[in-house]
Structures are given as structure tokens and as C-alpha cells.
Image (cartoon, rainbow, N blue to C red):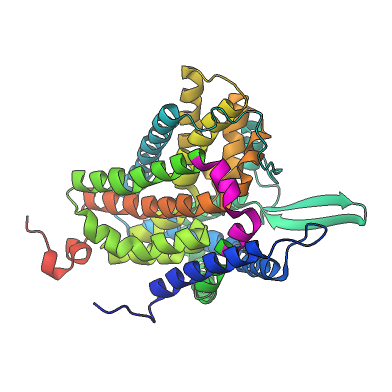
């Protein structure tokens, strides 16, 4: 069958291939006298940063409108409380499986063992997570979940404003529940929220069309900046992470589908656009509209999908919040020569299942990682060891996150009798009872 060169999927794959070539070319050009990036590397980094900034710009209104609308949509569903409970239960169940796989792989491969004393690229995380910070972070400081940070340099102080996505999630859930409580009086407000959601999704659609360019720039920048040396030095850890991701995506998820009477191939065929976009964008929230669309195409009730996917996009993180922190904690413990005990592994499981909302659906998993490290009493500086290859790892993590979000919605819909199997399989493959 001939390739469809105009298809979005082909364009993204082509962008990734071009990015690798440009990254290798920029890497071969070297750096300036003072270590500054060359022109090509700078262009790749700038283009990739602009793409990520565009995605981040639409995240706050998208999260607020999607969560509020999704909770309000529960009114149209029969047995809404049971659906919500089943969704959260499956979030926790699949996260538990993922973190156990991460721990088993870490105990077998022992990433980081023997690396102590070697020269590794150490960066400084720009954010940290601890249980006190996590609990305090749940309480919004203002109605807009805005936070300010000031950086003092020799040239002066610079203050920047940003949205705390975890607090915004809390605000959105509270407003959504309030709309259910108010009832008909909230209809004008809900009409505005739904209109806002439609507008933001249209803007996000334009940004998503830039994904082939963004993916080329992001992959090229990562290769140009770090090269293959950092990946080789941390190769065992990177390999362990991708092994864990592959097992969850290609073994655990298909088994769960089969256990619930569904065939894996139709699922992955229809979920692939969202999984692919998650891989290149590294943002579950940015992928949310596509994730919801493919979930509906799989036959999941539209009203339930409108509730489950926005919630999942901000809290359901099998890659970032389960596999990665487990392996990273073992790597850092091995690197610093610290022995972990059974209680420590139990804490990793607890943090992964309960604290996954700390990742908030944005690129990267540093907050979740530092939350895990602080709980175990491991050196927080260890997170900096992994920053060099984080962009490479984050692609795979986000792809698994997105796949898991679609999976849970599909399984819950199947179990609750609101899955259209004709849509899931296609009319030709409809399974007879």
C-alpha cells in the first residue's frame, strides 16, 4: 500500500527523521570559543522552545474549561458516581501495575550501579517536590492559581508569573462540583465554559499542526545539546526506562484489554494518533483533544469520555508517575551507594499511586521524581544527573501516559455497558455475543 505523504502521521515521522539529521549536523559543527551553541543548534533550540511555549500557553484555559465541562457532563450520565469511582479505581490499579514493573526491572538491571565517582552531566532541577509542598500546593493561593517567582541576577531581579497546574486542577474541580450543586442557575456559566473550550481547542488544533516542525526542532536540539555521549553514559538507565514503558504499553495494556473482552489491535490502531502526538509533544494536556477524539472513535460514550479524558490528562501518568520515578530512585540510590529496603520500595509504590497528580500533565516529571526522592530521603541533587537525557525519556513516558488514559476510559466503558463495540471494531469486525 502506498504511503500517504500528506497524512499527519507521516509528516510527524518525517519531522523526527529531519530533526535527527539536523541534530547530528549541529553537533558535528561544534560550539563557539566560549562554549556557546552554533547557529543551527540555537535555531533548533529556539524553535523547539517556541513550540513548547505555545502548548503551555493554552494549557490553563484548556484545563479549566475541560475539567469544569467534564464534571458538569456527569449530570447527563446514569450512575455518574459509579463511573467516577470506577475510573479512579482503574487509574490506581494500572498505576500500581506500572510501578511494580518499574521496581522489578530496577532490581534486576540495577541501573546506576558502578557509576559512582564517574563524571556525569549534572544539571539543577528548576522545581522540587516534597509532601509538605504537595499538600500546600493543593490549596490555591488565589482564584486563578497564579504563582510568581523572582530570579535575582547581576543585571537585576526578574519576576515571572505562571499557573500552578495542580492548584488550577483543584479550582476547576471545585467549580465543576459547584455547577452541579447550583443546577439550572449555572447554565449560562456552563454555556460560556463550553464556548471557551471550543475556542481553545480550535487554537490548540492550529498549534498541533505545527507538530512536525516542533518535533524536528525538539529532537534535533536534544541531540545537538547532549549528543549520544550522555545517552551512552546513562544507557543502562535509559534502556531500563524504555523496557518498562514497552512492557506496559505492549504487554500489560493488551492483556487488560483481552481480560475485558476486547481485541488489542483495533484499540491501538485507533489510539495511535494520540499516542504519537503525546510522544512528540511530551504533553498529556496538550494532547487532550486528540486523546478525547480517539476515545470517542473507539466507541466510548461521548459524555463519559468528556469526563474521563480531561481528568486522566492531568492525573493519569503511568509513564511519568509510576515507571520513571521507581527506576530513577533505584538509579540514584545505586549511584550514591545507598541501600534501599522493603519499606522504601513500599513508599515508592505509595508515592506513585497517590501522588501522580503532582505531574499535572505537563512536559517532564521532575516534580514527581523529587517528591519520590524526598520521601525516601535520597539526595535531591540526584535528579540533576538525569536531566541530560530527560527530553529523550519524556517522549516515551508521555506516549505511555496517553495510551493509559485511553485504555482506562475504554475498559470502564466496556465494563459499564456504555461502549459501542461496532465503533470499537468497525462494522466488519463486530463481535457477536
Image point (54%, 71%), residue name? 200
Residue 223 is situated, as x and y percent measured from the top left of the image, at: 59, 58
- Image quadrant holding the C terminus, namely bottom left
Can residue 376 be seen in the rendering of this structure? yes
In depth, the one of 72 and 321 nearer the eye is 321
In this view, 107 is above or below 208: above
Tell me: 68 left or right of 267.
right
Where in the figure is residue 175, as x and y percent of width and height?
55, 54
The residue drawn where x is 47% and y is 29% is 110
Q: Position of residue 403 (x, y in %)?
A: 37, 54
Furthest residue toward bottom: 6
Horizontal arrangement in the rendering, residue 425 relative to residue 202 (left or right): left
The outermost residue toward the left is: 433
Q: Is residue 253 above or below residue 11?
A: above
- The x, y position of residue 221, in whole percent, is 62, 62
Look at the image and say whether residue 225 sits in the magenta stretch. yes
Queried whether the magenta region covers residue 12, the answer comes back as: no
Amino acid at each position: 500500500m502506498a504511503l500517504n505523504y500528506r497524512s499527519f502521521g507521516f509528516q510527524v515521522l518525517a519531522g523526527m527523521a529531519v530533526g535527527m539529521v539536523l541534530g547530528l549536523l549541529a553537533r558535528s559543527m561544534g560550539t563557539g570559543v566560549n562554549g556557546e551553541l552554533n547557529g543551527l543548534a540555537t535555531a533548533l533550540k529556539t524553535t523547539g522552545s517556541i513550540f513548547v511555549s505555545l502548548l503551555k500557553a493554552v494549557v490553563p484555559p484548556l484545563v479549566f474549561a475541560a475539567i469544569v465541562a467534564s464534571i458538569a457532563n456527569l449530570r447527563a450520565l446514569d450512575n455518574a458516581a459509579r463511573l467516577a469511582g470506577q475510573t479512579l479505581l482503574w487509574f490506581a490499579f494500572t498505576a500500581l501495575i506500572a510501578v511494580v514493573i518499574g521496581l522489578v526491572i530496577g532490581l534486576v538491571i540495577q541501573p546506576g550501579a558502578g557509576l559512582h565517582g564517574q563524571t556525569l552531566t549534572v544539571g539543577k532541577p528548576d522545581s522540587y517536590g516534597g509532601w509538605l509542598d504537595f499538600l500546600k500546593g493543593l490549596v490555591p493561593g488565589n482564584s486563578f492559581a497564579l504563582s510568581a517567582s523572582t530570579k535575582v541576577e547581576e543585571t537585576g531581579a526578574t519576576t515571572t508569573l505562571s499557573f500552578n497546574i495542580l492548584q488550577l486542577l483543584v479550582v476547576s474541580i471545585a467549580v465543576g462540583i459547584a455547577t452541579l450543586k447550583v443546577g439550572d442557575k449555572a447554565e449560562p456559566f456552563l454555556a460560556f465554559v463550553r464556548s471557551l473550550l471550543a475556542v481553545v481547542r480550535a487554537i490548540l488544533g492550529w498549534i498541533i499542526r505545527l507538530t512536525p516542525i516542533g518535533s524536528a526542532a525538539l529532537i534535533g536540539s536534544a541531540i545537538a545539546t547532549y549528543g549520544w555521549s550522555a545517552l551512552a553514559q546513562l544507557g543502562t538507565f535509559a534502556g531500563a526506562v524504555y523496557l518498562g514503558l514497552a512492557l506496559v504499553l505492549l504487554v500489560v495494556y493488551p492483556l487488560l484489554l483481552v481480560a475485558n473482552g476486547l481485541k488489542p489491535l483495533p484499540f491501538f490502531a485507533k489510539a495511535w494518533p494520540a499516542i504519537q502526538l503525546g510522544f512528540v509533544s511530551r504533553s498529556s494536556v496538550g494532547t487532550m483533544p486528540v486523546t478525547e477524539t480517539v476515545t470517542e472513535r473507539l466507541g466510548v460514550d461521548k459524555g463519559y469520555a468528556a469526563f474521563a479524558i480531561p481528568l486522566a490528562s492531568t492525573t493519569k501518568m503511568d509513564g511519568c508517575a509510576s515507571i520513571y520515578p521507581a527506576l530513577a530512585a533505584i538509579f540514584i540510590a545505586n549511584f550514591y551507594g545507598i541501600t534501599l529496603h522493603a519499606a522504601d520500595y513500599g513508599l515508592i509504590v505509595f508515592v506513585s499511586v497517590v501522588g501522580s497528580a503532582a505531574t499535572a500533565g505537563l512536559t517532564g516529571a521532575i516534580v514527581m521524581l523529587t517528591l519520590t526522592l524526598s520521601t525516601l530521603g535520597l539526595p535531591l541533587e540526584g535528579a540533576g544527573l538525569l536531566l541530560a537525557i530527560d527530553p529523550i525519556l519524556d517522549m516515551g513516558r508521555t506516549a505511555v501516559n496517553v495510551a493509559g488514559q485511553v485504555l482506562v476510559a475504554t475498559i470502564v466503558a466496556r465494563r459499564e455497558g456504555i461502549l459501542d463495540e461496532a465503533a470499537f471494531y468497525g462494522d466488519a469486525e463486530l463481535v457477536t455475543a
